[in-house]
Amino acid sequence: MSLKLFDQEVFQLIREEEKRQKNTLDLIASENYASQATIEAQASILANKLAEGYIGKRLCAGCEVIDKIEKLAIERAKALFGAEHVNIQCLSATQANIAVYSALLDHGDAVLAPKLSHGGHFSHGSPRHISGKSYRFFHYGVSTQNEQIDIEEVEKIALEKRPKLIIAGMSAYPRKIEFSQFRKVTDKVGALLLADIAHVVGLIIANLHPHPVPHADVVTSSTHKTFRGPRGCGIIMCRKEFGAAIDEAVFPGNQGAPVMNIIASRAILLKEAMSPDFTRYQMQVLENARVLAEGLASHGIRLVSGGTDTHLILIDLRQLGLNGNEVESLLYSVGIATNKNLIPFDEKPPHITSGVRLGTAALTTRGMKRPEMEKIGTLIARVLLNPANESELLKVQKESLSLARKFPLFSNDWI
Ligand SMILES: Cc1ncc(COP(=O)(O)O)c(C=O)c1O
């Protein structure tokens, strides 16, 4: 029986969410709209299949088709990234990071990672995360001068703490990460290098951001941000020598059966990412971020590090006398979705923050380009500069809704 006939409540809620997505300008940097083909695979019969284990070594019968799907996804990932070994089974990028730690480290080993409050991720040693409870994490931040990574500072901490693993890759950092510089540091202190490319992976595929594979021992990624694929997914790529340990750490070390409908969806995504359209899309993501950043700055809004060279922009709200929590709500009330975010050297707590993070991956998928980004920059500025002006907010809300409605969720331009 169809969902519509069987469960009107859930059916209607899904319709409600569809309407919300259509009517909202989504600038949440870790969201995107996966293609129809990848969503079709997610909702396919593959969802029924148990497939614990790896290709040719499953714990149950009937995996001959599943094996072909997983092999295809792995081969495509190897070709796309130039990786020696790929594990495609992780249930999220957080799980991927946990698996990497358990494959490469012993309990109590030292790790050097980006600071959460300067744009890192909680799976990089937050005291509330299992990584922070299991290993001795030390953190590097960005420089006070330009709010960018200071590799000399990273090296100084590495020489002092002698980590076994150094992590490069962040969640809220608008600038390029030079993996080759991190490699020099890891070589100097005899550490391994993990590149966590969850955010910038799409730009990397399109050669618009430095590539980690020649430099890092292990690379982890999600697939739903700039990559524009399914959620519930982490990919691990590594040198051949770490392959067996990584596979063992994923299964049975940290999780059970893989989710085969998502693995099929990933295989489709990898094919999409090989097309020239994907490169065109990533170029537009970058161009859109630049235009949006310039627009905001032209209204006197301060951006962390002065701008962006990725899909991501971090606004510093301190001079406006506003905080991230209220701006996230204010922008959402006019139909613009963002997220509050700590900025480097923030004095506010994480549930308040002094910043908001924006990203252009989702709206670029909807087909928006320079004119729309210029418009959105002005809309955001009007909200930030008139936060208590009800009639202005109402006007912005109408304009943002009208803009959103002009761009369908599934744009044939890109896919
Ligand atoms: C740098 C980085 N690593 C890992 C993750 C975790 O991704 P997931 O939500 O798939 O666990 C994120 C998510 O925001 C991230 O930004």
Image: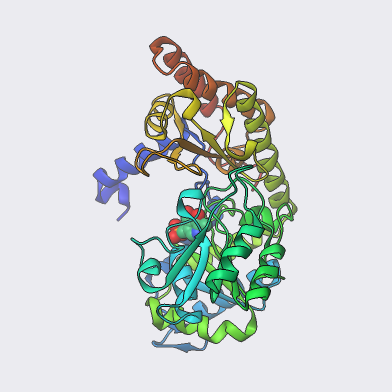
Residue 303 at x, y percent in the picture: 58, 34
Residue 105 at x, y percent in the picture: 48, 80
Q: Residue at x 28, y 46 (%)?
A: 10
Tell me: residue 341, above or below residue 1: above
Residue 55 at x, y percent in the picture: 52, 84
Q: Residue at x 48, y 74 (%)?
A: 110
Q: Nearer the viewer, residue 213 or 81?
A: 213
The colour scheme is: rainbow
Tally the numbered discs: 0
Q: Quadrant of residue 195?
A: bottom right
Q: Residue at x 47, y 34 (%)?
A: 22
Tell me: residue 82, above or below residue 319: below
Quadrant showing the N terminus: bottom left
Q: Is residue 167 visible?
A: yes
Residue 374 at x, y percent in the picture: 64, 25
Q: Is residue 75 visible?
A: no
Q: Quadrant of residue 37?
A: bottom right
Outermost residue, top side: 391
Tell me: residue 95, above or below residue 388: below
Q: Nearer the viewer, residue 391 or 272?
A: 391
Q: Is residue 255 left or right of residue 139?
A: left
